[in-house]
Image (tube, rainbow, N blue to C red):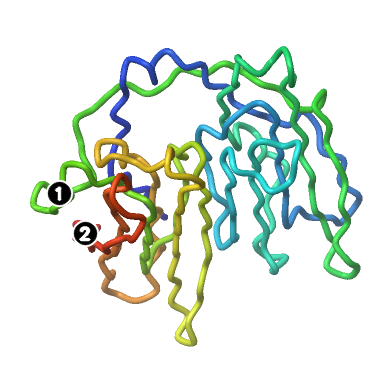
Amino acid sequence: MAVAVVLCCFQQSAVAQARKIWSCTVSEIALRPGEKIVGYTYNLQSAFISSVPKVAKDWDMTVYNGTSENPPWCSSLASRTEKLENAVPVSFFRDFVRVEMIDELQKTRPHDSVLIIYATNGLSRRRKFTTLRHDLKYTLVETCSAKDDDLIPKDVVVKARERICDFDLKVESAVISALPKTPRSWNESISIHISSDGKRRSELHGTMGDGEAALYPVDFRNLWMFQKLQATGIQTSPVKPTLTIGVADLSKTTELRSVTIPLTAVK
């Protein structure tokens, strides 16, 4: 059985604890006989994506969090697979995303959301249908308690005025199973690569949408979770993630310098 591995925990500030986070669940998805879900797009207005509690195994995914290229939507989440055997059940869409409403925009641009489902029976083209706002149920959830775990080791040199502008995470023998925290005004993408010998490599790329969104090291926590894949041989291979971040002192330059961060192997 696969084992979930959490690399780090969310360090909350007093401001973060005051934010209201809502869990989204779809009340009903009308599939035709024989159809399976192989993709979805979730669009938000006047809200940010706070976290993605579960990422479908071997699906590619993209998050635009406050930098959506599809106005009037503010944020969006899109995920899909090319293989019918990777299809997810309707139950996947219970607490599949968590959002934070932007209260200051409610009067001029009321909160709205839409979920677009892509389904196929494997014989015909994908069918696209829309689940509207009244079919999406939002429930207020409690945020996790603060802990002192820090992803960035103490010996990594990130200068005092530098901020994190992008990151590149690669991991073999595991998949990225969740994004516990999605930074505002950042774009993130998950891609899966399967080599000729059947080994899987998951990659997570993140880039800020503007300079205001650059992260301090203290903010760079609880951005993902791994799920270790079941070993096919007698011996299990350790999961060795590789993380590279791009940092810069944005008051002086926009040119990034690359920093590779050693992450502890997961047995």
Q: Residue furthest front?
A: 252
The residue type indicated by label 2 comes to Ile
Query: What residue would you read off at disc 1?
Result: 153
| Label 1 environment density (alpha carbons within 10 Å; few <14, some 14–19, many ≥20) | few
Under circle 2, the secondary element is strand
Which quadrant would residue 140 be assigned to in this image?
top right
Place of residue 22 in the rendered image (x, y in percent of width and height, measured from the top left): 58, 22
* Quarter of the figure that contains the C terminus: bottom left
Under circle 1, the secondary element is loop
Residue at figure coordinates x 38%, y 16% from the top left: 17
| Label 2 environment density (alpha carbons within 10 Å; few <14, some 14–19, many ≥20) | some
Q: Residue 45: which disc?
A: none
Query: What residue would you read off at disc 2?
Result: 261
Q: How many angstroms separate mark 1 from mark 2 (CA)? A: 8 Å
Mark 1 or 2 closer to N-term? 1
Residue at figure coordinates x 56%, y 24% from the top left: 100
Residue at figure coordinates x 31%, y 21% from the top left: 13
Left or right: where 183 falls relative to 162: right
For the residue pair 103 and 4, the one nearer the viewer reads as 103
Left or right: where 224 falls relative to 138: left
As displayed, is residue 156 above or below residue 65?
A: below
As displayed, is residue 141 above or below residue 237?
A: above
Place of residue 170 in the rendered image (x, y in percent of width and height, measured from the top left): 37, 65
Left or right: where 186 falls relative to 33: left
Cβ–Cβ under 8 Å for marks 1 and 2: yes
Place of residue 211 in the rendered image (x, y in percent of width and height, measured from the top left): 43, 44
Residue at figure coordinates x 45%, y 39% from the top left: 183
Q: Residue furthest bottom?
A: 196
Residue 200 visible to an observer of this rendering = yes
Left or right: where 56 falls relative to 219: right
The residue type indicated by label 1 comes to Pro
